[in-house]
Image (tube, coloured by chain):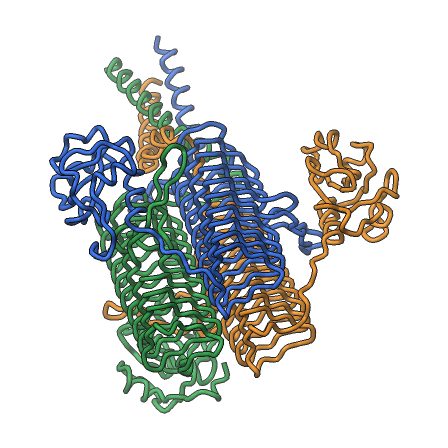
Chain colours: A green, B blue, C orange
Amino acid sequence: MNADSRPTFALFELVARFGGELIGEGTVRIGQVGTLETAGPGEISFLSNLKYQRQLGSTRASAVIVGEDARGATQLPRIVCRNPYAYFAKVSQLLNPRPPRPAGIHPEAAVDPSARLGAGVYVGACAVVEAGATIGDRVEIHPGAYIGPETVIGAGSIVYAGARIYYGCRIGERAIVHSGAVIGADGFGMAMEDGRWIKIPQIGRVVVGNDVEIGANTTIDRGALEDTVIEDDVKLDNQIQIGHNCRIGAHTAIAGCVGIAGSTRIGRYCRIGGSAMIGGHIDIADHVEISGGTAVAKSILGPGTYTSLFPVSTHEEWLRNASLLRHLREMRDRIKALEEQLKSLGGQRS
Amino acid sequence: MNADSRPTFALFELVARFGGELIGEGTVRIGQVGTLETAGPGEISFLSNLKYQRQLGSTRASAVIVGEDARGATQLPRIVCRNPYAYFAKVSQLLNPRPPRPAGIHPEAAVDPSARLGAGVYVGACAVVEAGATIGDRVEIHPGAYIGPETVIGAGSIVYAGARIYYGCRIGERAIVHSGAVIGADGFGMAMEDGRWIKIPQIGRVVVGNDVEIGANTTIDRGALEDTVIEDDVKLDNQIQIGHNCRIGAHTAIAGCVGIAGSTRIGRYCRIGGSAMIGGHIDIADHVEISGGTAVAKSILGPGTYTSLFPVSTHEEWLRNASLLRHLREMRDRIKALEEQLKSLGGQRS
Amino acid sequence: MNADSRPTFALFELVARFGGELIGEGTVRIGQVGTLETAGPGEISFLSNLKYQRQLGSTRASAVIVGEDARGATQLPRIVCRNPYAYFAKVSQLLNPRPPRPAGIHPEAAVDPSARLGAGVYVGACAVVEAGATIGDRVEIHPGAYIGPETVIGAGSIVYAGARIYYGCRIGERAIVHSGAVIGADGFGMAMEDGRWIKIPQIGRVVVGNDVEIGANTTIDRGALEDTVIEDDVKLDNQIQIGHNCRIGAHTAIAGCVGIAGSTRIGRYCRIGGSAMIGGHIDIADHVEISGGTAVAKSILGPGTYTSLFPVSTHEEWLRNASLLRHLREMRDRIKALEEQLKSLGGQRS
């Protein structure tokens, strides 16, 4: 993280690019971003939540990005803007450009002659592109990645090492698919007859929109009859499982380890917390937030935050309470009986 | 999904193959399957649950597969049978045959000379078959898959791109192993001594029966001392973790993201819902159904459906209630005290 | 598991190596380890918990390893020691040495000329080592594994088939990284602006200490600004997700399917049960044990065992009770009202 080896930008240059109001010395040069706690000279930090305001006093950063509410909270050179976290993201992108892989096909890659490759495509060692695949311009297919027959990858997408996309799927433009992700494996469909399972062919595809990021070891199954659809700008963390026929609405973000069973539809702009468990054949409205660890077995029809968590306690305390969970109805009935007795007692008294 | 490019079958041909009673015009030709909602002309759909009967009225399908209970529920040409969903599965298999990979070893595959390969085996680019492995007839080993030393793969099995099977394991016939699955990694075994962990060699194998399907990124650990065993016709969805020494009984189906800790035995014909968490060293009887998201920490000795889910609610409602979970015993004690007071009150009154 | 093909050791030789007190015939030769139930002649078993003492009576093992408390519980030749399970681990390591891969680079591997390789390194078929990587002495990089640019792997480490380590990460010495693990993918960081997500570059690394084991398909994300750190002797089972900026303290063991959200710090010598869900930005003290399936949303400041599990029951029983979870506060209020009525009733009476 040696800022010397990277280009630097003066604060006034940042404001010229990204807007915001500059307060203080505009010629301070910035080479890297950091947290309030760890940023040092030549670095810029940000404050997006007033509850961390105390850290502003002790930061060694050369400048900070703050919101209107904190414009006077520091004497440091600062950029005041509407959305400090987003501003910080843009500054970090500027200071940490991702070096693209140089175009070309590694001699140890295996690209089928019938695959169509756009301009500037990179295919790494031991990557495999099967027959009839279509790879857009500037796509990077890193070592050991796999693109199945007839699959289409949109321009500017990155498929990291060892990600695997089965046949006939469509990935949009500017997608990022991390290592170990598997897109388009068979959905989990079978019928029981005479004591044995009969496999149901999964004839749908996976169709992924533009600007989607898919985390490491996340799996998205192909549809049983129709397609599984991931709309534009969806962000999926690691180790998520999305069952066949699901549809995930645009701009929805899903944290790690979430499981979503088949045929479920999740709205736009939802946020699903880590390890949440979402049942099959349900609908979740737009702008729904699901807390981490929450199990959702029924549709959620309106926006809001939803939770189902048994609160953690010491094991001894848990032992004392947990067994009573099986007796809630009985407790309720005893309360009811008490109320009636007391009422009749009152009645007799009056 | 253009039916024109596939062979079609007349309804009477389907009945000749698969049985059932034909009602209506038997010469109607069928080229694909679909849902009641989406099937169009030339396609056949099915009704396996009377609660979807309303969709029968509006379907554009050319024919439907129904059970005895719905034989009169439509005027469409129809096949009446005992198990419409299984019938539908068989028709879909007929209409959507999976094209086998042509036999042969890709020049960029790495097959050890000491490996034994049956007839008609396919080994894709960048797949690796190690020393002493035995690959049965017509097995497909897709690009980037890995078969460890001395491992045996039964005839007709498919190992998809990038699935990995460690040394010394046995996979039965007609298995399907999806991308990213890892079979035979070390079980999680170690002993603590003097503040450090000592690894316990995992000297068992993974032994998988016939007709097993293993989902994408599912992991099955090798046994510590004995084998981990997956019996015939077990169906495993994606991202399942099966710990060392487990035994999964025949015909059991396990949905995505289920974790099963070590040395647990699950019976035959069980169904485990998605994201269920099953502890170690427990027994689950035959014909047990576990609801999705359910945590099982003790053995389940008889058939039935079992559940442990905190119901979801709005976050505010949850906040109101969740803290009281830690006070259930206190609430119970207060109810008891009220009952006693009321009793003594009653006693004094009489 | 035929002991004939392996070297054998007399009991007195084991005691000479590992200590402990020998009781009975010391020339009995041991070729393998086994459980009390399954060990046969020529094999040694162990008893680490008196609750399995009954099995001592029927075991066919030639010898057993026991603690002080069980020194007189059998007539078999036996080794008495302080920690029978750890002793057993060491005997098993002696009897089951892991054959190292012969040094050398497979002709179908792809090692960048700028990578630095130590002495005795093995690189398997279709494995990829990128530019500037540093591979320590005796490291094994199995087929299809991937080492990113500038990444460092310490001496004696094993990277199994198809594990993937992104650029710029550091793995310590004697690490074991199982198949499908992904280390160093981007953390899940983005900012919302004008209805779209902006990606925040993840400029930290993953830094893994010595003697760490990382299970199959486990994922550890690189830090957003600082590093994600896994300290020495941490043991991670399969399918664990560790978010960006986390720190896992030395000697902590985490079972399968655990998800840990970003910026969380877990102490030393913790044990986290399978499928536990640990929220982001929290601290967990040293010597904390978390039960399997437990969701942790707040910091845990002291040692002890912690649990949050809804107990499993039949689905019917669950239905009777679960709906009342949403009415706990109401139940509590009704109890309070009863108490007050009864008090005022008592008051009126006296």
Q: Position of residue A305 (x, y in %)?
A: 29, 52
Compared across the picture, whether A263 is left or right of B310 comes to left
Q: Position of residue A50 (x, y in %)?
A: 35, 67
- Count of marks placed on residues: 0
Residue nearest the viewer, comparing B319 with A209 = A209
In the displayed structure, would residue C316 be above or below residue A18? above
In the displayed structure, would residue C130 be above or below residue C39? below
Identified at 40% across, 43% down, the residue is B293
- Residue that extends furthest to the bottom in the rendered view of this protein: A27
Q: Quadrant of the C terminus of chain A?
A: top left
Compared across the picture, whether C10 is left or right of C350 comes to right
In the displayed structure, would residue B76 be above or below residue B202? above
Q: Position of residue B140 (x, y in %)?
A: 46, 56
Compared across the picture, whether B261 is left or right of A23 comes to right
Residue nearest the viewer, comparing A46 with B347 = A46
Residue A34 shows up from this direction: yes
Q: Position of residue B305 (x, y in %)?
A: 39, 32
Residue B319 shows up from this direction: no
